[in-house]
């Protein structure tokens, strides 16, 4: 069940899509199909966003995730300072913004969200912003594994709140009706696949 902060954030949700809380025991399903994500972070009045293809769910309860974040990114600087981040799952409709977020640095830009044509919304449990226009969101708090981050650029985190656009995900299941809503899967060099048709075994 969503807590008071989550309900408040849900009521404040604006932009191109609505958000409904996802039961944390089912949060892994938002990433289990391997989508490219947008990683956002904020600290001391600055915010940033980057694209990350190497991410995955790790556990069910409490849910955990892993994501590779290079040392040279400004997003990592903000994550290490704040101990928090958000993973937003962008659809095909945002492919150009995803490429821009993956190719630009936010270290020198006044606001990378604006530079990439992205809109932010407040999260419910962390200071990092959600990325509007996405189909799912996971609010994360970093687990202290400094050696892993230093040696492998790998960050582990606990998911403390999860959201989805009910038009494409509800009752723990994806049900995508339109091509523009499909999630992106990065191959290399700006090439992506989109989530395909479901197959039930």
Image (cartoon, rainbow, N blue to C red):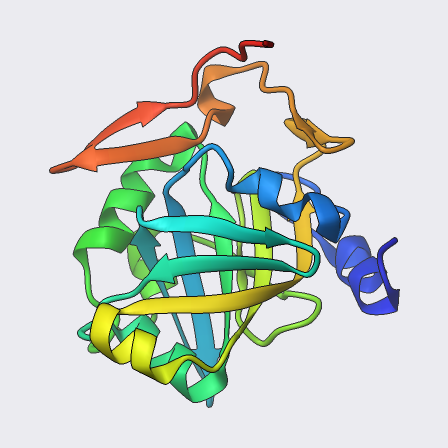
Residue drawn at point x = 36 percent, y = 83 percent? 146
Relative placement, left or right, of 201 versus 46 is right
* On-image quarter of the C terminus: top right
Q: Is residue 43 above or below residue 186?
A: below
**What residue is shown at x 54% (from left), y 9% (from top)?**
199
Which is nearer the eye, 158 or 168?
158
Q: Is residue 21 visible?
A: no
Q: Of all residues shown, which one is farthest toward the left?
A: 189
Q: Position of residue 55 (x, y in %)?
A: 39, 51
**Residue 92 x %, y %:** 39, 29
Above or below, 160 against 168 in this view is below
* Residue in view at x 43 percent, y 22 percent: 195
In the figure, 181 relative to 94: above or below? above
Please give left or right for residue 129 compared with residue 9 in the image.
Answer: left
Q: Write down the quadrant of residue 155 in the picture.
A: bottom left
Name the spot of residue 164 as percent of width and height, x first. Answer: 66, 41
Whether residue 109 sits left or right of residue 200 in the image: it is left
Q: Residue at x 46, y 90 (%)?
A: 44
Q: Position of residue 188 (x, y in %)?
A: 15, 37
């Amino acid at each position: 069940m969503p807590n008071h902060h989550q309900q408040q954030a849900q009521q404040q949700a604006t932009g191109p899509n609505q958000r409904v809380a996802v039961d944390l025991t089912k949060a892994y399903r938002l990433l289990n199909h391997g989508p490219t994500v947008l990683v956002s972070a904020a600290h001391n009045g600055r915010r940033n966003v980057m694209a990350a293809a190497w991410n995955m769910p790790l556990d069910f309860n409490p849910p955990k995730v892993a994501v590779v974040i290079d040392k040279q990114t400004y997003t990592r600087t903000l994550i290490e300072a704040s101990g928090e981040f958000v993973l937003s799952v962008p659809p095909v409709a945002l492919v150009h913004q995803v490429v821009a977020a993956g190719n630009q640095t936010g270290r020198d830009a006044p606001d990378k969200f604006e530079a990439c044509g992205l809109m932010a919304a407040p999260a419910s449990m962390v200071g990092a912003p959600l990325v509007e226009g996405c189909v799912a969101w996971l609010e994360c708090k970093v687990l202290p594994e400094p050696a892993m981050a230093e040696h492998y650029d790998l960050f582990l985190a606990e998911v403390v709140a999860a959201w989805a656009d009910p038009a494409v995900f509800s009752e723990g299941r994806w049900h995508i009706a339109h091509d523009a809503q499909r999630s992106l899967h990065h191959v290399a060099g700006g090439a992506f696949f989109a989530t395909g048709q479901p197959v039930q075994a």
